[in-house]
Image: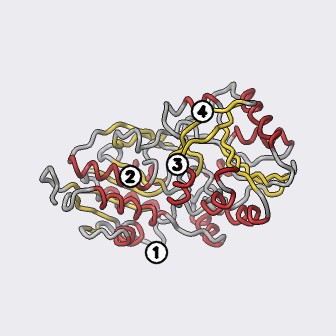
Amino acid sequence: MTSPTGRVVRIGLVVNPIAGLGGRVGLKGTDGAEVVVRALALGAIPAAGARAARTLERLRADAPEGSIELLVAPGPMGEEPARAAGSTRVQVVGRVSHERTTAEDTRRIARVMADVDLLLFAGGDGTAADVLEAVGGSVPALGIPAGVKIHSGVFAVSPEAAGRVAARVARSARLDVVEAEVLDLDEDAYRRGEIAPRLLGYLRVPRERRLVQSRKAPSPAGERVVTEAIAADVVERMEPGRSYVLGPGTTVRAVAERLGVPKTLVGVDVVRGGVLVAADASERDLLAIVEEGPAAIVVTPIGGQGFVFGRGNQQIGPGVVSRVGRGHLLVLATPWKLASLGGAPLRVDTGDPEVDAGLAGHLQVITGYGERAVCRLEA
């Protein structure tokens, strides 16, 4: 089978191998060499390459044979994920200057790929910023979500979704694009609970509403009364012997305030019997707690994006989710937050497709005191 258009589509891939390292160990990002060292010391396992390989596997399955020429960065920045995915028509371009790759490596290799039909990059907001600096709006680009902070509107909703978009380009040899915001946060301020995203510029991304996420939408002022009502509902339902894993966000923070315990705004905490038993917990901490006894998970979706897991709360990894079970998942959202999705479903991206599939389906979302909305949760 050959390309329907008769033209070979050139797709570039650059991977930030350290993207997402800080997520499950509770570091909330991986900016800075010292944070990488600390994350590895805490047992963090690189996952960006595996997520990029998932994208390429989907691309191989969906694209017509012979329709794609894949340009990849050397080693773990592209070549290794491509080989792991079984890609054969691969051209390695650029060079890596250090044993541990840097942002400059990403920028330099992205510039080499400035003439591709679509540039795929695996990472988070920081990687998106590097691609923006390197190519600006000169080449269509799409992020494979692999970082901790993924607030920008330039990422596919999952690695497989990125592969589906790239395959559509291969089938049609054309691409309808739209400008989307690249946002980034100061990680040091983020770790202190200060959320102040900066607009860095715009990348041209494929116009695929179902497959490409929107930018994170901040909650409007005046939501306080609603979040307090939601918190009252949750606290009344709490069982004395059950541990409650409280995810990040102001909606969940209202639950901690109702209990009279401190809450890490951008971290994950655990309460039991109205008492704080773990603050700013890592995935390892959470696994130990949920294995001790019954537990529940309390989370709120990302405004404008709808992600319940996989965006900023990677500490609540697939192992934690599967042990707690879907029946003890409490999703909280104000009516405004649900409306900000524009009819799109809630989404999960835990890093384990099987766990994601097990979560999919309809569920009740707590939207006020005694108030519920039935929403679709999509893997």
Can the viewer see residue 7 in this picture? yes
Helix or strand or loop: what does disc 4 sit on?
helix
Q: State the residue at coordinates (48%, 71%).
A: 100
Q: What is the number of the mark on residue 185? A: none
Left or right of residue 246: residue 63: left
Q: Which residue is mark 4?
A: 337
Closer to viewer: mark 1 or mark 4:
4
Which numbered disc, 1 or 3, marks the residue that appears first in the sequence? 1
Amino acid type at mark 1: Glu
Residue at horizontal 67 percent and vertical 32 percent from the top: 372
- The disc placed on residue 150 is 3
Going from N to C along the chain, the mark reached first, 1 or 4, is 1
Q: Find residue 163 and report its image quarter.
A: bottom left
What is the CA distance from the residue labelled 2 to the residue labelled 3?
A: 15 Å
Three-letter amino acid code of the residue under disc 4: Lys
Q: Quadrant of residue 259?
A: top right
Q: Which residue is mark 1?
A: 99
Residue at disc 2, secondary structure: helix
Q: Position of residue 35 (x, y in %)?
A: 61, 64
> Distance of mark 4 from mark 3, alpha carbons?
18 Å
Q: Nearer the viewer, mark 2 or mark 3?
A: 2
The disc label shown at residue 162, or none: 2
Q: Is residue 250 above or below residue 324?
A: above
